[in-house]
Image (cartoon, rainbow, N blue to C red):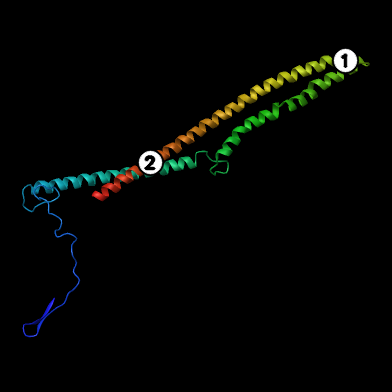
């Protein structure tokens, strides 16, 4: 800045100036050909405005569609979460139970079979109802007897017990495999629900990304 007059003389004061790095600014594109620019009352003005309106309406419609889609996905996630939480049913107390209690109930059939047919219990029952009475009757009949006089009864007992043992394990394994098969079906069903939930969560994420991109453009 210069202060003073021709009589007093001039005094120049220098102040800080904001200078551009280059002596020229950004070049202005040819607005006639650049689609980003619209010239009021210029050539194709109405067409460009209508194109912008159409694009705006299209994006708005797509955004509404995506918002409806993500709302449905969120609802489906809530539904499947409830199915997973209640998958193993409810106990006698009405409370939601876990896998452990379902398997425990199924195992009751095996426990009952084992209690009634395990070799130890069968032998105890056989002794009481068959072997011991037969031994007693033989002793009373013979009066004087030797241990070998009862070999046939003992052999018969061994044969009966061995046969029962074989039949017991066949039936035990049959029941056990049946329980395993039921649990596998249930486990597979739960895994299907979990996989379905993962798919819904991925779908939700994909739609959310689309919405963010459209919001940015919109």
**Relative to 23, does residue 92 appear above or below in the rendering?**
above
Residue 19, quarter of the rendered image: bottom left
Q: Residues within 10 Å of mark 1 (few under 14, many from 20)?
A: few
Q: Is residue 146 left or right of residue 80?
A: right
Q: Is residue 59 left or right of residue 205?
A: left
Q: Residues within 10 Å of mark 2 (few under 14, many from 20)?
A: few
**Relative to 149, does residue 41 appear above or below in the rendering?**
below
Find disc 2 in the rendering and name its residue.
Answer: 202
**Which residue is found at the position 74% from the left and 27% from the top?**
120
**Which residue is found at the position 39% from the left and 38% from the top?**
199
Residue 144, quarter of the rendered image: top right
**Which residue is found at the position 49% from the left and 32% from the top?**
188
**Relative to 35, does residue 119 appear above or below in the rendering?**
above
From the image, state whether disc 1 or disc 2 is nearer to you.
Answer: 2
**Residue 100 point in image, percent of width and height:** 58, 38
Q: Which is nearer the eye, 177 or 136?
A: 177
Disc number at residue 148? Answer: 1
**Residue 112 point in image, percent of width and height:** 66, 30
Q: Which is nearer the eye, 25 or 45?
A: 25
Q: Which is nearer the eye, 202 or 172?
A: 202
Residue 91, quarter of the rendered image: top right
**Residue 60 point in image, percent of width and height:** 23, 47
Q: Quadrant of the N terminus?
A: bottom left
Q: Which is nearer the eye, 38 or 22?
A: 22
| Distance CA(mark 1)–CA(mark 2) | 80 Å
Which residue is farthest bottom? 7
**Residue 14 point in image, percent of width and height:** 17, 74
């Amino acid at each position: 800045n210069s202060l003073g007059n021709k009589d007093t003389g001039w005094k120049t004061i220098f102040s800080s100036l904001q200078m551009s790095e280059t002596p020229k600014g950004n070049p202005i594109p040819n607005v006639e050909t650049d689609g980003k620019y619209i010239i009021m009352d210029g050539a194709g003005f109405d067409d460009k405005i209508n194109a912008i309106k159409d694009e705006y309406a299209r994006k708005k419609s797509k955004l509404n569609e995506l918002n409806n889609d993500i709302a449905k996905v969120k609802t489906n996630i809530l539904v499947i979460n409830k199915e997973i939480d209640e998958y193993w049913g409810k106990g006698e107390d009405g409370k939601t139970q876990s896998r452990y209690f379902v398997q425990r109930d199924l195992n009751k059939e095996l426990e009952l079979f084992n209690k009634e047919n395990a070799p130890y219990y069968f032998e105890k029952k056989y002794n009481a109802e068959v072997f011991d009475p037969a031994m007693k009757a033989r002793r009373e009949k013979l009066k004087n007897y030797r241990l070998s006089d009862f070999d046939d009864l003992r052999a018969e007992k061994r044969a009966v017990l061995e046969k029962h043992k074989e039949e017991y394990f066949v039936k035990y394994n049959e029941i056990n495999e049946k329980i395993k098969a039921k649990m596998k079906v249930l486990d597979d069903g739960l895994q299907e629900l979990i996989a379905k939930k993962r798919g819904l969560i991925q779908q939700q994420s994909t739609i959310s990304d689309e919405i963010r991109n459209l919001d940015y453009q919109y």
